[in-house]
Image: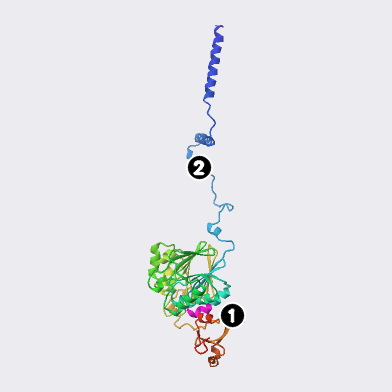
Amino acid sequence: MKRLLPLFLAVILCFTFVGCSEANDQTPQAESPSETITQTESESSTASTEETTSPTEATTTAIPETTDQPSTSSTTPPAVAEQLPVDSSFSIHFIDVGQADAALVECDGHYMMIDGGNKADSSLIYSVLRNTGVTKLDIVVGTHAHEDHIGGLPGAFNYTTTDLTLCPTTNYDSDAFNDFKKYAEKNGGGITIPSAGDTYTLGSATIDILGVNDGSDTNNTSIVLKITYGSTAFLFTGDAEREVEQAILNRGADLSATVLKVGHHGSDTSTTYPFLREIMPEYAIISVGTGNSYGHPTDNNLSRLCDAEVTVYRTDLNGDIYVTSDGQSVSIFSDKTAAIDEIMTPGSSVTTSPPATQKPEPVQNDSPSEGTDYIVNTNTGKFHYPSCSSVKKMKESNKMFFTGTRDELISQGYNPCGNCHP
């Protein structure tokens, strides 16, 4: 027995050595970081499984609980607000030009004129631009060839120049259009006919042409455009009627807008229910003349706006209307106030008396030494040299003294005297 003990111990030591060698041979090689993370997560999951009833419960407990109050520091401002410059500005001045249309748009010091009223409004447009401090127009839009939209635009071209003049046609048989075309060629780069889908910029604002020449009738050639500034938008429809509205709907254009310039002065043939449902405006502006013979705005048009819960403004009751936007919301104020029941009363019921005839405001040159002196007969619409014999026969109440150029007077609707030929 004593002799077997050393042998027994040797066998035990031998088996111990072999076991250690096999253990060393099975030691895994160094794992990659991803494998290590996977293994750790697996082990952690296994441990969690052993301590909880299910893996789902373990995952849920690992997610931080949310609170009702958002963290101010982590709140991200709207993307729209970040896109607008800090000192950005946007406004629209809807000018009261009676039974006509005219609006001056400003964005970041850039200006666009959309329509300009009748020929008699030429001096008013001139004055608005001068009083606003406009030094240059980026874009002039004549939505269509009718005088009540392009007649006063020569006043804009007389005051300053523009880079781009948009209109659905380059030819139309009327004196008003011929004057507009002449001055557009002189100071507006000529007339450009846009196409639906064209896009322009005005400062931080984007202008999309949604429709043009969608019908053969002159009203239905109207340029329909949408101005987008931040998350606010403004839709101008000229005198477009049902035919145009349906064509734009068929193209699937994005019509959503905060403010709608109501088509065709509130005519029953415009602002149809399907069109209005796509726009869903908060505000509507109707450019319309007091006591107009068309009965604009019509009862049906106002009813549709009322059904859509739109706040309505009218130039015949509110005068000049001013809209501003900060890119998130709009503010509106006007020269005059009117009660809601007045606003929602059809045009033919507001007054039966014709609108008072207003004499055009004289356009006085800032430097009297520049230009030529003329005497304007506000009754006949003729202008004369001061030495003309016709001036002596003129009533003092009809005399208007003017210093400027001959073209300025013609653009305002006055005609040269046939005797002195100024």
Magenta stretch, residue numbers: 117-124
Q: Is residue 20 magenta?
A: no
Contact check, label 1 and label 2, Cβ < 8 Å: no
Q: Secondary structure at mark 1?
A: loop
Question: Quick check: can you spot residue 74?
Answer: yes
Residue holding disc 1 = 365
Q: Residue at coordinates 55% horizontally, 77% vertically from top-left?
A: 127
Badge 2 density bin: few <14, some 14–19, many ≥20, Cα 10 Å? few
State whether the magenta stretch is mostly helix, strand or loop.
helix
At which x and y percent is residue 280? Answer: 45, 64
Q: Is residue 145 above or below residue 4?
A: below
Residue holding disc 2 = 60
- Per the rendering, the mark at residue 127 is none
Hey, what amino acid is under mark 1? Answer: Asn
CA distance for labels 1 and 2: 78 Å
At which x and y percent is residue 124? Answer: 53, 78
